[in-house]
């Protein structure tokens, strides 16, 4: 399993335990007591490491290459997924997944950023950085959800919208701004879950929602720690310091009223137990949609408007 720098002692101990187990089977020697001691040591080491993570370490976990992505969650908790393609103006953006699905027989529209697992797929998915056609595709399917009275579920996982010349020429800022305006007017329930990175306008472009949850080791921020460090200190190496200042982790965001819920992850991160985190995400979606669907349309719109108007307001 790919590991981060602060995880090295854990991975080394896990490797040692696995080697002992293999040796015990191969040589038919009883090493169960030694393995039990190491298992106990490993459990304590995991708790000491993961319960006290810094903001920067959580950012690193949010970017872990084995972390579940949008299509993984769709396959684990949804059924009958039919992907919808294209913005009807330019092309189909592979960094933005859109389609119809069922969640426990509940019909809904699902939208999400999609990263790749290797270089080839990351180039195809543009590292999860959507172009304007991706945001226009998302808007198109949300308009479809409005027409057919379907709730919308959004999986956010992007370092930001693609900043290239082509994207700017095709109206990146306009596409995102249009989504911000239009999402405020839809009368169907909309929920978003930040499953990894929630960076800047790339995240907010599909983030004007009634409820937003952030996974325990995800982040949601106006800028990446590296970008913030480069602007404030002219030094990208100060990213760990910037991560602390930005208050981008779930508990800080919840305290400031910017999100509605922190979804707990398995010890060590979502990639350690994909089925467990998928179940936690599913329960959160079903619970929030149930609460939102009983609201009449006027109430839903008023609450959504009030939610965003109250952000940044201090007592």
Image (spheres, rainbow, N blue to C red):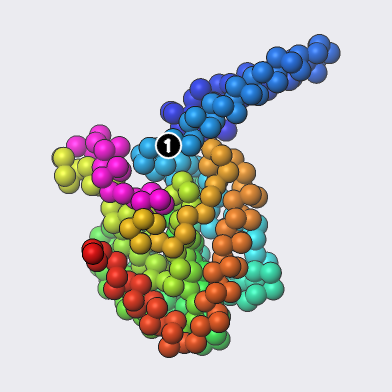
- Residue 100, given in percent of the width and then of the height, sits at 59, 73
Look at the picture and state if 123 lies above or below 22.
below
Q: Residue furthest front?
A: 315
Q: Is residue 310 left or right of residue 137?
A: left
Residue range of the region highlighted in magenta in the rendering: 235-253
Q: Quadrant of the N terminus?
A: top right
Q: Residue at x 43, y 88 (%)?
A: 298
> On screen, 187 above or below 68?
below
Give the x, y percent position of residue 208.
Answer: 38, 71
Total number of numbered discs in the rendering: 1
Question: Which residue bears the numbered disc 1?
Answer: 53
- Is residue 84 visible to the viewer in this orientation of the structure? no
Quarter containing the C terminus:
bottom left
Residue 277 appears left or right of 245: right
Between 243 and 121, the residue placed more toward the observer is: 243
Instruction: Look at 54% across and 26% down and name the residue there.
Output: 45
Q: Quadrant of residue 105?
A: bottom right
Is 240 part of what is drawn in magenta? yes
Frontmost residue, 6 versus 230: 6
Q: Looking at the picture, does residue 44 appear above or below residue 189?
A: above
Percent x, y for residue 31? 76, 14
Element at label 1: loop
10 Å neighbourhood of mark 1: few (<14), some, or many (≥20)?
some
Do we see residue 12 in this rendering? yes
Where residue 299 appears, as percent x and y from the top left, is 43, 85
Instruction: Name the residue located 64 percent from the left edge and 19 percent from the top edge.
Output: 38
Which residue is nearer to you in this view: 158 or 221?
A: 221
Residue displayed at 56% across by 62% down: 284
* Outermost residue to the right: 28
């Amino acid at each position: 399993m790919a590991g981060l720098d602060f995880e090295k002692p854990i991975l080394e101990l896990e490797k040692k335990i696995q080697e002992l187990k293999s040796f015990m089977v191969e040589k038919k020697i009883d090493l169960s007591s030694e393995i039990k001691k190491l298992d106990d040591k490993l459990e304590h080491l995991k708790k000491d490491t993961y319960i006290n993570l810094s903001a920067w370490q959580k950012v690193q976990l949010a970017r872990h290459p084995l972390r579940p992505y949008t299509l993984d969650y769709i396959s684990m908790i949804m059924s009958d997924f039919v992907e919808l393609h294209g913005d009807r103006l330019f092309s189909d953006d592979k960094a933005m997944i859109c389609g119809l699905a069922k969640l426990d027989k509940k019909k809904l529209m699902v939208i999400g950023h999609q990263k790749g697992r290797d270089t080839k797929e990351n180039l195809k998915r543009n590292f999860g950085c959507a172009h304007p056609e991706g945001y226009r595709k998302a808007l198109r399917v949300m308009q479809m959800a409005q027409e057919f009275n379907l709730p919308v579920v959004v999986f956010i996982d992007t370092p930001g919208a693609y900043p290239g010349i082509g994207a700017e020429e095709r109206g990146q800022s306009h596409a995102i701004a249009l989504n911000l305006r239009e999402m405020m007017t839809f009368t169907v329930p909309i929920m978003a879950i930040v499953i990894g990175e929630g960076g800047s306008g790339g995240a907010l472009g599909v983030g004007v929602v009634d409820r937003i949850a952030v996974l325990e080791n995800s982040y949601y921020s106006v800028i990446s720690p590296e970008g913030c460090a480069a602007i404030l200190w002219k030094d990208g190496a100060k990213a760990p310091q910037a991560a602390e200042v930005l208050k981008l982790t779930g508990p800080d965001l919840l305290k400031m009223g910017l999100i509605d819920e922190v979804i707990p992850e398995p010890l060590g991160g979502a990639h350690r137990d994909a089925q467990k985190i998928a179940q936690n995400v599913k329960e959160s979606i079903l619970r929030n949609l149930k609460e939102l669907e009983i609201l009449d349309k006027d109430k839903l719109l008023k609450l959504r408007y009030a939610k965003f108007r109250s952000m940044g307001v201090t007592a």
